[in-house]
Image: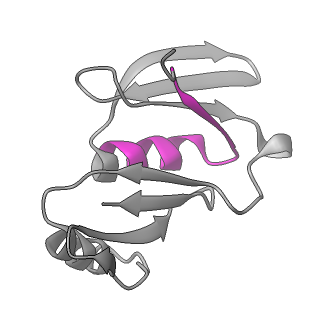
């Protein structure tokens, strides 16, 4: 079994697309545009990481307790870049010498972990 995608209902569709393209390395793979029903699928080049964004202002994500993790090459450098872009990243956590990570919130309030 393979996970196909993570779905996020959003009131901020274009802002969310911009975030996942600019900071998570995903690109738009497919769009479904119908009156009142816009959906965008973004994925990495291999199609292994896929986010489905559904424009749904009345049902936009408002919860907590969910995070999506993305691997980056240099955690401290990425942390600094996120600060410079105006995000408010958490401190860098390193629960053991082999892993470092931090979190930011996407435009919908979903925690995004950069590992």
Considering the image in quadrants, where does the C terminus appear? bottom left
Magenta residues span 4-21
Q: Residue 7 lies in magenta, yes or no?
A: yes
Residue at 45% across / 40% down in the picture?
17
Q: Is residue 22 above or below residue 112?
A: above
Residue at 51% across / 23% down in the picture?
3
Tally of numbered tags: 0
Q: Nearer the viewer, residue 1 or 64?
A: 1
Q: Is residue 16 above or below residue 101?
A: above
Q: Is residue 93 left or right of residue 112?
A: left
Q: Is residue 58 left or right of residue 15?
A: right
Residue sitting farthest toward the bottom: 91
Q: Is residue 58 above or below residue 38?
A: below
The percent coordinates of residue 64 (x first, y second) are: 72, 63
The percent coordinates of residue 6 (x first, y second) are: 57, 33
Q: Nearer the viewer, residue 86 or 44?
A: 44
Q: Residue 69 lies in magenta, yes or no?
A: no
Question: In the picture, residue 44 is in which quadrant?
Answer: top left
The percent coordinates of residue 14 (x first, y second) are: 51, 42
Question: In the picture, residue 38 is in which quadrant?
Answer: top right
Residue at 41% across / 75% down in the picture?
87
């Amino acid at each position: 079994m393979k996970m196909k995608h993570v779905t996020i209902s959003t009131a901020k569709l274009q802002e969310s697309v911009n975030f996942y393209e600019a900071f998570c390395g995903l690109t738009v793979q497919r769009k479904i545009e119908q009156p009142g029903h816009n959906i965008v699928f973004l994925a990495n080049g291999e199609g292994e990481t896929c986010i489905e964004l559904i424009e749904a202002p009345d049902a936009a994500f408002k919860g907590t307790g969910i995070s999506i993790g993305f691997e980056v090459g240099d955690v401290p450098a990425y942390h600094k870049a996120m600060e410079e872009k105006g995000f408010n990243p958490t401190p860098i956590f390193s629960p053991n010498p082999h892993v470092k990570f931090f979190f930011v919130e996407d435009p919908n309030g979903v925690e995004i972990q950069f590992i």
